[in-house]
Amino acid sequence: MRNKIFSLLFSLSILLSACASPAESATLKIAVLPIIDTLPMYVAQQEGLFAKHGVNVEFVPVASAPERDQILAAGQVDGTINETLAVMAFNKKSIQMQVVRYALRPTEGHGHFFIIASGKSSITDVNGLKGVEIGVSQGTVIEYVTDRLLQSAGFTPDEIKTVAVPKIPDRMALLASGELSAGVMPDPLASLVVGQGGVIVADDSSHPEYGFSVISFRKQVIDENPKAVEGFLAAIEEATTLVNADPAKYKNVLSEQNLVPAPLLDAYQAPVFPAAGVPSEAEWQDALSWLKDKGMLDVDVPYADSVNATLLP
């Protein structure tokens, strides 16, 4: 009799588990860098939008892009904000990750990356950068944006010079001292360099096809629980609308999550975040061509398998 009761209870638990909605019970772990791109995610959490759409979200703070990529490769997190270049690196042998949405895209008046001349240099405009070493994080979106912006300004390949300064604090210090004549900084840290006398000579606000970031997930997570990712993206869409309508309301998030340095908080204006959408095939192919030209990739990573727009609300 006891065995029959146990079997009945076991069967009932299996039935109840099968009837549960995957999105209701799923937890998505998201690796987050302290960057402005994450603002809608934190707002979605603060406003209860993830719960509203039936998904639990756990943020896993990381200090650098290499750390982010390491825990993604190990399967310790499910998704993140990164760039198409990073997704291509994951997918060079097989499809490991898929882009599901833009995260942040430059708009007029709101650049994402800025080429800044040191206040101790004599450079005042973009033409002053010809033949000048520009501090970048090599092999990343920062170098990609730098190359494309200068090429758009008419620079020939031999006029574009970059030097590896991978750590942003080092780049800032070298620009302030004048040891580095120019360097590339993201928003909002670029404002700190300008406050130290730096001069913005170019930014990507007029070329949004280069400096955008994306939300991407491991393909295994998408395949096993697409409803959870759909719920996540629906929450992000609502949060994006809230942020764009009243960015000042979420100044507490900027401070609490260290997205904006304290000296900039009062004057900082959040960028306009993009509505639902994914990178175009032309944007993907341009970044892929750049990686191949640099010798960092020797295969064609397929757009159709790497960018997935089917989960957007």
Image: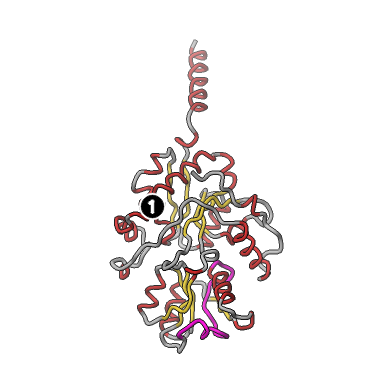
Count the labels in the image. 1
Residue 153 as seen in the image, left or right of residue 244? right
Label 1 SS: helix
Residue 152, placed above or below residue 133: above
Give the farthest residue toward the bottom. Answer: 122
Q: How is the image coloured?
A: secondary structure
307 vs 182, nearest the viewer: 307
Label 1 crowd bin: few (<14), some (14–19), many (20+), radius 10 Å: some
Judged left or right of residue 303, residue 39 is left
Magenta residues?
Answer: 124-141
Residue that numbered label 1 is attached to: 42
In the displayed structure, would residue 113 be above or below residue 119? Answer: above
Residue 235: horizontal and vertical position, in percent?
Answer: 42, 45
312 inside magenta stretch: no
The answer to which image quadrant residue 89 occupies is bottom right
Residue placed furthest toward the top: 1
Residue 263 found in image quarter: bottom left
Compared with 61, 167 (above or below) is below
Amino acid residing under circle 1:
Tyr
Q: Residue at x 40, y 70 (%)?
A: 189
Q: Position of residue 177 (x, y in %)?
A: 42, 85
The structure residue drawn at horizontal position 56% and vertical position 52%, both measured from the top left corner, is 99
Residue 187: horizontal and vertical position, in percent? 42, 68
The answer to whether 132 appears left or right of 45 in the picture is right
Identify the residue at image location x=48%, y=61%: 105
Give x and y (percent) for residue 305.
64, 50
Nearer to me, 72 or 157: 157
